[in-house]
Structure formats: structure tokens, C-alpha cells
Image (cartoon, grey):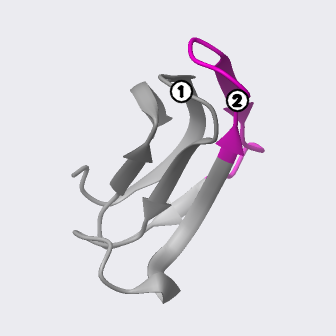
């Protein structure tokens, strides 16, 4: 988990088809209402995903918690 911050960019690589990244404004993923970012991509392994958010980013006041599916790695840029 990352403490209070602004999400600025997301980079990831799939380990299989139908990869996904979910980022929550929380310390866990127990409440769907805290979901602030979701990305789904890939038709096979080793496909990259990059997404840059606008200048203000997405503010996560509580924390940033990520849940990965079929994803080798995740890099987030935050402020």
C-alpha cells in the first residue's frame, strides 16, 4: 500500500490474456465503492500497458491499494 497520494501514471505487463489492474482508495479491496482506477488489456502474455493521467491525477486520500490479475508487474507513478 502507498499512503495518501495522487495517481499519475500506470504501467504494467500481462502474464496471460485478460490482464487487469484495479487500484483502490483504501488499504484493501473489500469495498467496491473505493475503486478509483481499473484497466483491462492483453490477448496474450507479455503485452504492455501504459496510461498517463491528466495533470491532477486521481487523489487517493486514504491509501493506494492495487489488485492484479494475470499481471507480471505494475509500476505506478504518484505524487
Instruction: Indicate the position of residue 38 as horizontal and vertical percent values.
Output: 62, 57
CB-based contact (under 8 Å), mark 1 and mark 2: yes
Q: Quarter of the image holding residue 24?
A: bottom left
Instruction: Indicate the position of residue 7 as horizontal and vertical percent values.
Output: 52, 47
User: Looking at this view, is 10 or 21 the one in front?
Assistant: 21
Q: Residue furthest top?
A: 46
Q: Main secondary structure of the magenta part?
A: loop
Instruction: Indicate the position of residue 57 as horizontal and vertical percent values.
Output: 64, 51
Q: Quarter of the image holding residue 50?
A: top right
First to last magenta residue range: 40-57
Q: Earlier in the sequence, mark 1 or mark 2?
A: 1
Gap between marks 1 and 2, in whole Å? 7 Å
Residue to which mark 1 is pinned: 16
Image quadrant occupied by the C terminus: top left
Magenta highlight on residue 56? yes
Q: How would you rate the neighbour count of disc 1 (Cα within 10 Å): few for under 14, some for 14-19, many for 20 or more?
A: some
The vertical placement of 61 against 31, above or below, is above
> Which residue occupies 46% across, 80% down?
34
> Which residue occupies 59% across, 40% down?
8
> Which residue occupies 52% across, 63% down?
59
| Element assignment for label 2 | loop
Residue to which mark 2 is pinned: 42
Magenta highlight on residue 19? no
The vertical placement of 48 against 2, above or below, is above
Q: How would you rate the neighbour count of disc 2 (Cα within 10 Å): few for under 14, some for 14-19, many for 20 or more?
A: some
Q: Is residue 49 left or right of residue 75?
A: right
Amino acid at each position: 500500500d502507498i499512503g495518501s497520494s495522487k495517481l499519475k501514471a500506470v504501467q504494467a505487463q500481462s502474464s496471460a490474456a485478460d490482464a487487469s489492474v484495479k487500484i483502490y482508495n483504501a488499504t484493501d479491496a473489500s469495498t467496491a465503492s473505493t475503486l478509483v482506477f481499473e484497466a483491462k488489456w492483453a490477448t496474450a502474455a507479455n503485452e504492455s500497458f501504459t496510461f498517463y493521467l491528466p495533470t491532477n491525477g486521481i487523489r487517493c486520500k486514504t491509501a493506494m491499494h492495487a489488485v492484479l490479475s494475470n499481471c507480471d508487474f505494475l509500476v505506478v507513478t504518484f505524487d
